[in-house]
Amino acid sequence: MSAHTTFKVGGPADLFLTPESEEALIAAVHLLGAEGIPFFVLGNGSNVLVRDGGIRGAVLCVGQALGGIRTEGSEITAGAGELLVSLSHAAAKAGLTGLEFASGIPGSVGGALYMNAGAYDGEMRDVVISARVYDPAAQAVRQVQPEEMALGYRSSRFQAGDLLILSVTVRLTPGSEEQIREKMRQLMEKRNAKQPVNMASAGSFFKRPPGQYAGALIEQAGMKGYRVGGAMVSDKHAGFVVNTGGATAADVLAVMQAVQERVRETSGHWLMPEPAIIGEDHFADGNEN
Ligand SMILES: Cc1cc2nc3c(=O)[nH]c(=O)nc-3n(C[C@H](O)[C@H](O)[C@H](O)COP(=O)(O)OP(=O)(O)OC[C@H]3O[C@@H](n4cnc5c(N)ncnc54)[C@H](O)[C@@H]3O)c2cc1C
């Protein structure tokens, strides 16, 4: 899974499926269900940490084959596998404002809704008006309205894990393409100046405790630059844990734990990780007793 995640760590999955159409995705879900094989839905892999033993079961990758962008007036519908960055550029091209915040977030549209991804002055909650999902329990495709999505700070009802997001529709506001692109440029400049964007990571590693910034608490705890093996608290932005090359998931988890403990000692806050942490610590091929 190190090849399929931006952290570039993690052992192998038993099965890695990249369906090329919605029908194939749904067929794969049926087949896996019938065979009793558990599966994990992966978008662009920019908010997951896979442990070193990898994943027993299947990974169902909602990739760019399940993308596509359609604009109708001020509404844009994108396939879940489309890159959020491409969606924000399509909005700019159509002269629609509201998605500038998304221009530097390296996730898929499905992953962005699942996480209610956001940055600076915006988040998915501000723009999404509906999503098409596949519900494996009901074996049906249906629409989900914002009221049902329960979008909060990096959280949504999709995190219950019972629905696959197929496409997302956003409603934006007409604006000047030039101004939209200028705002995107400014936000990217801010991001590049403050974040270790050229290093392997999953973005901000810890969720913000209410009223606080995780990065500031970590810096105050003296953990900026703290390292275990190839994993390190970024010396550019303490909210990021980066893979400096050759890190294992165990290294990342050791950094996480040390930061959590030290920050609790110095501030009383227990920092929760933002990425999904999945898979097994050790690889078992079934031949062990
Ligand atoms: C350099 C960097 C910068 C980042 N900056 C930001 C930022 O500014 N703001 C921010 O919010 N995040 C940021 N992130 C984190 C990440 O990009 C977002 O959380 C993004 O929305 C994750 O999307 P993904 O497609 O990569 O999801 P993945 O990492 O593939 O998956 C994340 C979760 O979503 C679920 N999921 C994915 N697709 C679907 C689907 N179609 N249906 C159902 N469930 C699905 C997965 O099962 C998993 O639990 C950053 C990450 C990096 C590496």
Image: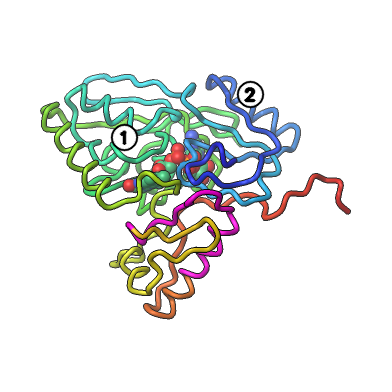
The N terminus lies in quadrant: top right
Residue 230 x/y as whole percent:
53, 56
Q: Nearer the viewer, residue 31 or 88?
A: 88
Q: Label 1, secondary structure: give it.
A: strand
Q: Indicate whether residue 22 is drawn in magenta.
A: no
Residue 107 x/y as whole percent:
41, 38
Q: Indicate whether residue 256 is drawn in magenta.
A: yes
- What residue lies at 30% left-to-right and 32% top-to-bottom? 170
Ligand number 1: quarter of image: top left
Q: Work out whether 267 lies above or below 182.
A: below
The answer to which quarter of the image holds residue 219 is bottom left
- What residue lies at 50% left-to-right and 28% top-to-bottom? 63
The residue to which callout 1 is attached is 129
- What residue lies at 31% left-to-right and 39% top-to-bottom? 104
Would you say 185 lies left or right of 12 here?
A: left
Q: Amino acid at mark 1?
A: Ile
Residue 279 x/y as whole percent:
64, 49
Q: How many marks?
A: 2
Q: Residues within 10 Å of mark 1 (few under 14, many from 20)?
A: some
Answer yes or no: is residue 148 visible: no
The answer to which quarter of the image holds residue 127 is top left
The residue to which callout 2 is attached is 27
Q: Nearer the viewer, residue 117 or 103?
A: 103
Residues rendered magenta in the picture: 236-259
Q: Amino acid at mark 2?
A: Ala
Would you say 260 lies left or right of 90 here?
A: right
The C terminus lies in quadrant: bottom right
- What residue lies at 24% left-to-right and 27% top-to-bottom? 91
Q: CA distance from mark 2 to mark 1?
A: 27 Å
Answer yes or no: is residue 35 visible: yes
Q: Label 2, secondary structure: give it.
A: helix
